[in-house]
Image: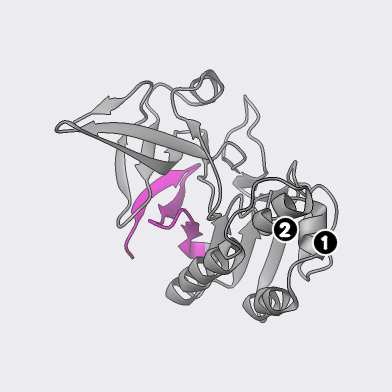
Amino acid sequence: MNGYGFTLAGTALTALPSGALYWEARNLLCVSDLHLGKALRRARLGEPPLPPYETRDTLTRLESDLRRTGAATVICLGDSFDDSAAAMHLPEAEKLWIAKLQAGRRWVWIEGNHDPGPIDLGGAHMAELPVPPLLFRHIARAGHSGEISGHYHPKVRLALKGRSLSRPAFLIDSDRIILPAFGTYTGGLWSDDPVLTGLMRRDAVAVLTGAMAHAVPMPRGTYRA
């Protein structure tokens, strides 16, 4: 499978180029920070508009990963919707699309800071999900091992032969993984931010998303190669 293979707590995992995480032994796909309905929320609040296709684009990429992996379990790791109202006001076609993706699968919505309450879109809703030896939650907590989280939308900056490149990225060390945001309209936190450098060990790697998953030492500044 095209991706970056590694182990966490003795468990073989694959960071996919899309930003999804795949656990083959459990046939489990995990994505974080979809932020579905962001364009709708901004329009509702009178903020500068965004082209209203981000939910369709995000669901298209998620469907592609589900077809590629055949995952039987999906964990959405929080902030799946830009707010609770965005979940309720998704167009009917997009609600039906989500129901189609859920059909025949175990589907778990982990609560995030944007979507803390239950949503009426099928699947289970949990604060966090232990699947020993791993633990899935939205926001990382210092001192925990085997933890898979999101929330921070990590990104890295690279300087490659005189040109600059930035990409969303997984951050991985021996204790935890922080997933990049999977959603189309999402910003990010640079990997050299004190919040992220404080969570990740010195030997952490960043796995860039894009055409292929590519690992570099986690930049604590601009990475040069």
Picture disc at residue 119: 1
Magenta region, residue range: 1-25
Query: Is 109 left, or right, of 143 in this rendering?
Result: right
Q: Amino acid at mark 2?
A: Trp
Q: Is residue 14 magenta?
A: yes
State how many labels appear.
2
Regarding residue 78, the answer to whether it shows in the image is: yes
Q: Residues within 10 Å of mark 2 (few under 14, many from 20)?
A: many
Label 1 secondary element: loop
What residue appears at the point 68 percent right and 70 percent down from the top-left corner? 106
- Image coordinates for residue 191, horizontal then vertical, percent: 44, 29
Corner quadrant of residue 94: bottom right
Amino acid type, mark 1: Ile
Relative to residue 129, is residue 145 depicted above or below? Answer: above
Query: Is residue 4 on the magenta stretch?
Result: yes
Disc on res. 109: 2
Q: Furthest residue to the left? A: 161
Residue at 34 percent across and 57 percent down: it is: 3
Residue at image location 71% in from the left, 58% down from the top? 40
Q: Foreground residue, 104 or 214?
A: 214
The numbered mark, 2 or 1, whose residue comes first in the sequence reads 2
Q: Are marks 2 and 1 in contact (CB under 8 Å)?
A: yes
Disc on res. 75: none
Please identify the quadrant where the N terminus is shown.
Answer: bottom left
Residue at image position (56%, 55%) is 31
Position above or below: 166 against 192: below
Give the CA distance from mark 2 to mark 1: 9 Å
Q: Which residue is at the front of the view, 72 or 39?
A: 39
